[in-house]
Image: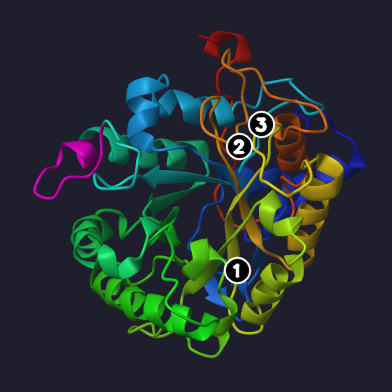
Amino acid sequence: MQTGSHTPGSVFRSFVFLTFGFLCLPERLPAATPWLHASGNVLKDPQGNVVVLRGISMIDVGGTEKMFGGAIRMIDRITNTRDPQGNSPGWYPRVIRIPIYPSDEGDYKSPWTFVPGRDDFYEKLLRPVVDHCAAKGVYAIVDWHYIGNTFDHLETTCRFWEYMAPKFAGESHVIYELFNEPINQVGADEECWLSVRKDMQVWVDIIRRFAPKTLLLIGGPSYSQIIGNAADHPIYDPIGGNNFAMVSHMYPNHWLNTNADWYRNHIDRCLKAWPVFMSEWGFSRNFRHRHIEAATIDNYARPLMDWVEQRQISSVCWAASYDWYPMLFNPDWTLRCGKYEMGCFLKDTLYEMRNEDQPCSGESPSDAAGVPAAKLSD
């Protein structure tokens, strides 16, 4: 909202705000991070408004802190409302994903991650990062970022959620993503999902002992591609309400695949029963797959965003990096732009959709001005 303007429209909006503070007005939305819950196949706020979150994923938060200039600095960069790159005046994400790579995760060794029995990761890194998201008026996804079979990491994931679930249980802006990308290729689609569901149920039960209100994001097998079977064989929420969304990841090798309908049908089948949260999508010129044409804004990004918006699916772009693929930035932290790059496209899309399907709150909007882009360059 422009300040100092006294047009009839602005006077009317001010009157409505003062008289009916519970109503949702676009100008007030950036500060609102109330509890979200699943209702049918959508997410809603406490007033019953449908909510669609759009945002950005960081890479490993420990790596961001130790090797890429700091996690708080990264959040400031991607919430900077004074960054003029692209065709929009600033960044307007509504959710930031915070991946935590376990110590035994694949080929990547995080320089700082959760270690059972130690508090330093939580106290000195994760807690300040999650609090900074709250100060910026954005939701924070605490993402336990395994890529593997759930049954190979059952105990380590139990220890993580036993420790972490109570830490943010009372905070409405925090969402838990239980296990980034299950693989569990143990048979047909249904068998794969039942294998994942068995372990996810263990973790849901643990989390609900400590965090009864937190929205949960639950991945499916085959790297969060097989989710349609969750409609027939759901997770059980021990406190009732089934307050979770199923996770989908949709990259160019899925969207542009000759078998693309299989991936999309899994999402549509899932939506018959549960919300879907696309916690990873993205593309860049150097992020290529064999037998898949080069992804562009026109053949991948814009059609995908239109497709998820039609279905009221929340989405998070991977990743806020110049070193991990697909990437948003150049090494000098300028955005990667052009038809083969997602940097400017994402920023402009977040700005365009900043007031669409957002939660209501009785709070006043915060001034998340951020730091000018010029001061963020290394």
The location of residue 52, given as percent across then percent down, is 65, 59
Question: SS at mark 2?
Answer: loop
> Residue 295 placed where, x, y %?
77, 42
Say which residue appears at 28% left-offset and 34% top-offset. Answer: 125
Q: Which residue is mark 2?
A: 326
Check the image and report above or below for 67 versus 115. above
Q: Nearer the viewer, mark 3 or mark 2?
A: 3
Q: Residue furthest right?
A: 8
Q: Residues within 10 Å of mark 3 (few under 14, many from 20)?
A: few
Residues under numbered marks 3 and 2 in contact, where contact means CB atoms less than 8 Å apart: yes
The magenta stretch spans which residues?
A: 112-123
Q: Which mark is residue 244?
A: none
The label on residue 286 is: 3
Chain-order first, disc 3 or disc 1: 1
Q: Callout 1, which amino acid?
A: Val
Examine the rendering and report whether any part of residue 367 can be seen: yes
Amino acid at pointer 2: Pro
Query: Residue 135, percent across and down?
Result: 45, 37
